Image: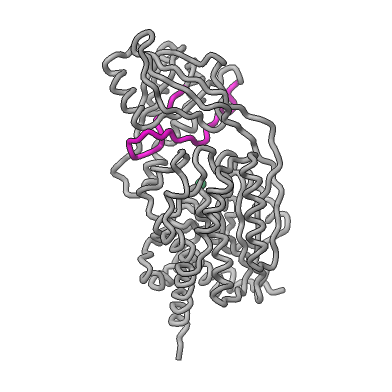
Amino acid sequence: MITGAQNDSENIKNIYNTSLSNGKSYAWLDHLSNRIGSRLSGSLGAELAVQYTKKQLDSIGLDKVWLQPVMVPKWVRGTPEFSYIEIAPGETIPVNICALGGSVATPLQGIKANLIEVQGIAELKALTQEDVAGKIVFFNRPMDETLINTFNSYGGCVDQRYAGAMEAGKLGAVGVIVRSMNLRIDEFPHTGSMTYGDLPVNQRIASAAISTKHADLLSSMLKLDSNLKLYFKQNCKQLKDVQSHNVIGEITGTEFPKEIIVVGGHLDSWDLGDGSHDDGAGCTQSMDVLRLLKESGIKPKRTIRVVLFMNEENGLRGGRKYAEEATKKGENHIFALESDSGGFTPRGFSFDCSDANFQQILNWKPLFEPYLIHYFEKGGSGADIGPLKGNNNVLAGLRPDSQRYFDYHHAANDTFDAVNKRELELGAATMTSLVYLIDKYGINQINTNQQLKD
Ligand SMILES: [Zn+2]
């Protein structure tokens, strides 16, 4: 006799076999990365990606595929940025630099000024107007190398990128340079979002990231000569919002179609690389979850929906729009899973849910052990699915190995060649297996209280 658990382990083995021998995530990512390329919100690439992924979802025989309109911000980088350290008049060293997303341009002729180096926002706030006015603030706090989860290292210093220009602008700085959020010492500048808050327009100063190698160089040179100058020039611009779309497809549940399970990633990316890890990987894995269920002969009882969210990077408009529409329609999202931590070897999941739901999920942990999936912890889920949080549902994030993620994150080297096919496919299979279990058993509290049958 086959017990429930035996049956589950066979079905999960079948899911992994199918993903590793007949997965589609890698081929889809190849097209998205190499044929379409970067997908910054409001760009041509983003629109081509919407059309392409919709067409692919149409081709795999889902019950429904549709586009959900959403207005998104449109920021453009303009001509390539340019920067150098000036040691003496006419004596310069080039610096690899990129504007931060949302930044204003420098004046047409660029900015050349003395620098003041700080290790973060707290250190800046301890300074006076007199210390800072007329200078470029150089935020140089490195990511903490000792943390095993590199997302924690990122979280420990990303505020200088996000809010550095706002705080420096208040003190009369003329520009901001931030050390790239990267644990590796290399030559790639890493972009990312930033804000001016409600700072008046005349206090908004240009902000940019420089490579970790140049941040180290600049810092050591400043120790020898605090009077050296940095020049940088950028002509990025914030344009009017434009219409874009979330891409959605579903397999309608056979028994409890009103209980919705979402799996997704974000379709937009930054513009420097092609966004293969962030987050082309998560999108194509999520698309393949629905296809792998079908290929494995599993007919979901609940509705399984893939959502490719637009505009996670610089606005989160897609995630908010999706949740807003779900509320309007009174939809019941029992579970949502996001993959937005790169296409690396999966280690497990983090869960944002009640203790009771977490205990239920922990019971399934042994089923994942043959695949070296062991990380089941409570914690965050994903930015795009965050707005779906309710009293009684489970949100989860796929947690791949994070050691190499920040080598590529938001930089020109986040390209297809940085993604390993098997690692990507293992991630898709891991996601599919969890979705399979949630679909089969439901979520404790909802299941016992209110069976939502059509
Ligand atoms: Zn991302």
> Which quarter shows the N terminus?
bottom left
Residue closer to the observer: 34 or 198: 34
Instruction: Give the percent coordinates (x, y) of residue 232.
Output: 47, 20
Identify the image's colour scheme: rainbow, by chain, secondary structure or one colour: one colour
Q: Residue at x 49, y 49 (%)?
A: 276
Residue 216, relative to residue 258: is it above or below? above
Quadrant, the C terminus: bottom right
293 left or right, relative to 360 = right
Q: Position of residue 189 (x, y in %)?
A: 43, 33
The boundaries of the magenta stretch are 176-200
Chief secondary structure of the magenta span?
Answer: loop
Of all residues shown, which one is farthest toward the bottom?
A: 1
Image coordinates for residue 159, horizontal then vertical, percent? 45, 34
Residue 95 drawn in magenta: no
The correct choice, above or below, for 88 with respect to 408 in the image is: above
Name the outermost residue toward the left. Answer: 224
Outermost residue, top side? 89
- Quarter occupied by residue 326: bottom right
Quadrant assignment, res 449: bottom right
Horizontally, is 305 left or right of 227 in the view?
A: right
Q: Which residue is depicted at the point 44% across and 80% down? A: 5
Q: In terms of depth relative to the viewer, which is nearer, 102 or 47?
A: 47
Q: Is residue 386 visible to the viewer in this orientation of the structure?
A: no
Residue depicted at 66% across the width and 30% down the height:
239
The answer to whether residue 141 is visible is: yes
Q: Residue at x 61, y 33 (%)?
A: 75
